[in-house]
Image (cartoon, rainbow, N blue to C red):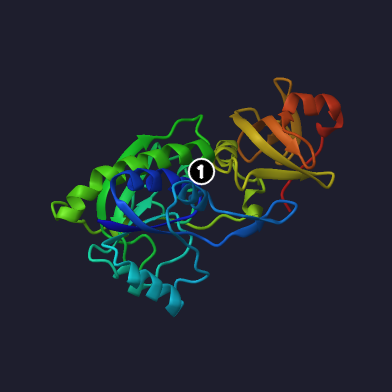
Amino acid sequence: MRIIFMGSPEFATPSLDALRRQYEICAVVTQPDRPAGRGQSMRESAVKELALAHYLPIIQPHSLRDEAAFEELVRLNAGLIVVAAYGKILPPNILELPEHGSVNVHASLLPRWRGAAPIQAAILEGDKQTGVTIMKMDAGLDTGPIISQKSIPIHKSDTGGNLEHKLSQLGAELLIETLPGYLSGEITPAPQDDSSATYAPMLRKKDGQLDPAQDADRLARQVSAFEPWPTSFFFWEDLRIVVRSARPHPSEIGTVGDVVEIEALPAITTAFGSLVLERIQPAGKREMSAADFLNGSPHFVGANIRRP
């Protein structure tokens, strides 16, 4: 079976690595190199780095709607396209190109959390479990029929980063378990229940600003969900402070947005309870314990960081 693999970030690399060991990868399609970091040097995607390490052919089209890109995929004569966090919507002519269509490794238990940020959404909303779905792709956004699913619990210690790692491994395992039955016709994809669908839109950096008008439990989940990206933050004296770790506390002292001290740590009074800061990172500095920050800036207590 000749397979075209489409993916870009670290989440996709376990699936590609598992596939290349058992199937012929006739091409790896990934996002073009992009400038990144302070120096704006060109950076390759994690998938491209893996493909280069194993001498897999690489294609980096700027648009899948270009006729030249489509013709290049046609010439590969692949029997299946496998997609994992590619980052762009596939047009119908590419979805339907291979004999067995296109399948996607999605990091949620569809139809819950269709969209670009399902891992963060599951933590933010307090879901008890999440998982991965292998689905046959159609023209909609994560609306295709389900081929297989596998779930795992979400623990209080999970962050967006470590849960993504768990799901990337789980997705690769499920993909390899599922493909033989799917390709042989033994597995029939089942339609999703659209009435149960929820949507997780793409996150932006500004989405991480903490809003004390929410309750402390939700803000603590936000800190976990948005770690390590897009991160959660607030402003104090024009200083942007990233919150790397925090926990809720039932105490309410002062008004919403007030910075108080709880158990020798700085805490933000919220609409319900307080958000105790454990580890923070002021702009331009290294991550530090919130206790150390408070020792160096005792006047932080008494401030108000109400979101504008």
Q: Can residue 212 be seen in this snapshot?
A: no
20 shown above or below 288: below
Determine whether the residue tagged by mark 1 lies in a helix, strand or loop: helix
- Is residue 2 shown left or right of residue 8? left
Q: Position of residue 158 (x, y in %)?
A: 50, 33
Q: Can residue 74 be seen in this snapshot?
A: yes
Q: Position of residue 43 (x, y in %)?
A: 62, 54
Q: Which residue is mark 1?
A: 124
Quadrant location, the N terminus: bottom left
Residue lying at 52% horizontally and 61% vertically, measured from the top left:
31
- Residue furthest top as drawn: 263
- The crowd level at tag 1 (other Cα within 10 Å; few <14, some 14-19, many 20+) is many
Q: Position of residue 261 (x, y in %)?
A: 75, 26
35 shown above or below 250: below
225 shown above or below 30: above
Residue lying at 15% horizontally and 54% vertically, measured from the top left:
184
Q: Nearer the viewer, residue 56 or 61?
A: 56
- Residue furthest bottom as drawn: 67
- Is residue 72 shown left or right of residue 279? left
- Is residue 188 shown left or right of residue 88? left
Report how many numbered discs are placed on residues in the image.
1
Q: Position of residue 136 (x, y in %)?
A: 28, 59
- Residue furthest left as drawn: 186
196 shown above or below 78: above
The amino acid at mark 1 is Leu
- Is residue 260 shown left or right of residue 43? right
Residue lying at 70% horizontally and 35% vertically, measured from the top left:
268
Q: Nearer the viewer, residue 185 or 298?
A: 185
- Residue furthest front as drawn: 55
Q: Nearer the viewer, residue 52 or 99?
A: 52
Residue lying at 37% horizontally and 60% vertically, measured from the top left:
142
